[in-house]
Image (cartoon, coloured by chain):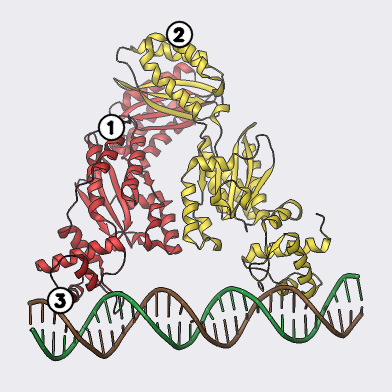
Chain colours: A yellow, B red, C brown, D green
Amino acid sequence: MALSERKKQILHAIITEYIRTAQPVGSRTLARRYKVGLSPATIRNEMADLEELGFLIQPHTSAGRIPSQKGYRYYVDDLMEAPDLEEEVRDKIRQVYDFEKLKEIEEIIKHTSNLLSLLTNYTSLILGPQLKKSAFKKLQIMPVDHQRGLLVLVADTGFVKSKVINLPQTLSPGELNRIVSYLNMRLDGLTIDKITSSLIVELRRDLYHHIQFLEDTFTLLQDSLAEDERRVFLGGTTNILNQPEFGDIEKVKSLLSLFEQNSLLATLLSRPVAGVKGIVIKIGRENILEEVHDCSLVMATYCLGKEVAGTIGVLGPTRMDYAKTVAVIEQVVNHLGRL
Amino acid sequence: MALSERKKQILHAIITEYIRTAQPVGSRTLARRYKVGLSPATIRNEMADLEELGFLIQPHTSAGRIPSQKGYRYYVDDLMEAPDLEEEVRDKIRQVYDFEKLKEIEEIIKHTSNLLSLLTNYTSLILGPQLKKSAFKKLQIMPVDHQRGLLVLVADTGFVKSKVINLPQTLSPGELNRIVSYLNMRLDGLTIDKITSSLIVELRRDLYHHIQFLEDTFTLLQDSLAEDERRVFLGGTTNILNQPEFGDIEKVKSLLSLFEQNSLLATLLSRPVAGVKGIVIKIGRENILEEVHDCSLVMATYCLGKEVAGTIGVLGPTRMDYAKTVAVIEQVVNHLGRL
DNA sequence: ATTAGCACTCCAACATTGAGAGTGCTAACC
DNA sequence: GGTTAGCACTCTCAATGTTGGAGTGCTAAT
């Protein structure tokens, strides 16, 4: 699949131009706007070749060419070079991560997703950290009224989960405290996924005389566990509507209803094999979901501290500005890693 | 503005038909489908009158008539009668509120908003309860690591707010406990809006040697206070796209970006004067925001327990099915009041 | 007061046309 | 042999008719 230098150059130019204008690119325009020292006729020949090879598509006889999926793939893998970001952009990123004191994960993620959609003008998706991997830190029960209490579960990542539970009225404050400290002791330092159901059974045995109350507690624990359903944070959902390819209401509708389905979004983002570092780009039909078959997704795993936390992604039309998007994501992931 | 019985009947029929079909209604259709014992010609005369009076609009000569805003208003105030809900619908409502044990406000609201959008096929908006009005219940600080703690604030309504704060390292656990119980004592039973800044100043004086740490605490308190910005919960945002009036991308875009702006939504919903009971309907331009000038909003205040908690609303095109929507909202508000 | 009849208006859907953009091919050129 | 000019051809898009249907308003008859 080795293309001649000239073909590469032409393909590059076509894709660049198409990304800019969203219009099929003709040989004339190319000759005029990009200083290949070639006449339109020669370019036409090359374009015909590139079409034969599957990199370009002609929407109809006598229109210019547009990149095919294969064309984008080649561009992304071999042709594209990430631009330096403008100082202005770098500044904005720095601002978000420096000046605001972000302590809670959720806050960090929300800011990040806003930032991404702002900088790229596409829609950003961020898959939150996996609760499983974080370590149990502390569990606390605060009485709310005489029959209910608030159970708070804190993970070391700063992740907090709370739930109102029923407390048996027969339970004295002292007992409650003892139970809580016992649980804290037993669970101390474990990662959440170590809290298996067998451990729970064991605990339940140890504390069998408080069964009723514990049911709720364990339910929360197990829910948190079972909630492999990691939350996906969205930013700039309307950005994508500004793209000329979304003139069609049907498309808009299917995309927007996709945005409402957290689990599907999570599927989308969880593709890159755990551990794969760097940026992964899914173009058009390379994505699993039909709704985004004419979108592309640029994603990367991000770390918070040392742990791989989740996936960060930007969704745009297949005709998106890959180079810039990649640059932005790299920069952002970088900053995130330092927190 | 007293209309003759016959005019009322015709206006009613036109609106009903238009709500059903979204097409201008002509005299022929009306004579055929609605058993007014009149010929098209007579109906035409009446329609001309109604147009003169401002209840109807003719999109162009020789199209049928559609209701004007004034027409809808008259319909809603004087003509419409709320239908009995089908058993099937009543069942669905009962299911949501009976079988699932909803303890936390947020959960209740989320379920309600889903329910509403499901039953009406429009978009539901729910303005959450005002933190201000609920009573302070308890404040707790749980250490997370050696320099950070999780501050949890519980209101008696079950409302929970938490924030990670910095703890000065010089603070011993004993001291921390004393501070917490002191704060609890001082704040006990107050409604949140009683925790004015003057009280905070006072507390701050009493505890002046822990200033740094307290800053964060007070910030949270004040944030919760200042957060008059009450959260609006949305359901079925894509439903409204199924309405034929949203064939235009521009409209969709402006509406969707409105949906992303919590504060604007809160404005929309907070119109009905506090205390007004019953259902309020805002038609078209009666709404403040331009984005919904061709939508209508049916809303009602809802109670949780005895307190007025917030506003519940359904947003559809001006051509929405007011009768059904009103019936559904009434039913839902009813159920909510019983929780 | 109601209705039948009729001329009139307007929209929406469909065809027609011409201009513009772009191609592929051929033949000439370096 | 690679490159280019020239030209016929194709296809879209926008503008411009054309037509049929739906609905009206008016008038005259009931």
Q: Please say whether residue B1 is visible from this viewpoint.
A: no
Earlier along the polypeptide chain: callout 1 or callout 3?
Answer: 3
Compared with D17, B232 (above or below) is above
Name the residue that disc number 1 marks.
B98
What's the chain of the residue with tag 1?
Answer: B
Element type at mark 3: helix
Instruction: State the CA–CA distance, disc 2 to disc 1.
Output: 34 Å
**Whether label 2 touches label 1, CB < 8 Å:** no
Compared with A76, B202 (above or below) is above
Q: Provide residue A276's location: percent of width, then percent of height.
A: 69, 37
Compared with A153, B330 (above or below) is below
Name the residue that disc number 2 marks.
A206
Circle on res. B42: 3
Q: Do discs 1 and 3 share a chain?
A: yes
Relative side of A126 to B160, left or right: right
Q: Provide residue A14's location: percent of width, then percent of height.
A: 71, 65
* Of labels 2 and 1, the one closer to you: 1
Compared with A199, C30 (above or below) is below
What's the chain of the residue with tag 3?
Answer: B
Element type at mark 2: helix
Q: Provide residue B180's location: percent of width, then percent of height.
A: 40, 22
Identify the amino acid type marked 2: Asp
Instruction: State the CA–CA distance, disc 3 to disc 2.
Output: 85 Å
Q: Do discs 3 and 2 share a chain?
A: no
Instruction: State the CA–CA distance, disc 1 to disc 3.
Output: 53 Å
Q: Nearer the viewer, residue A95 or A246?
A: A246
Residue at 47% x, 51% y: name it: A256
Residue at 36% x, 43% y: name it: B114
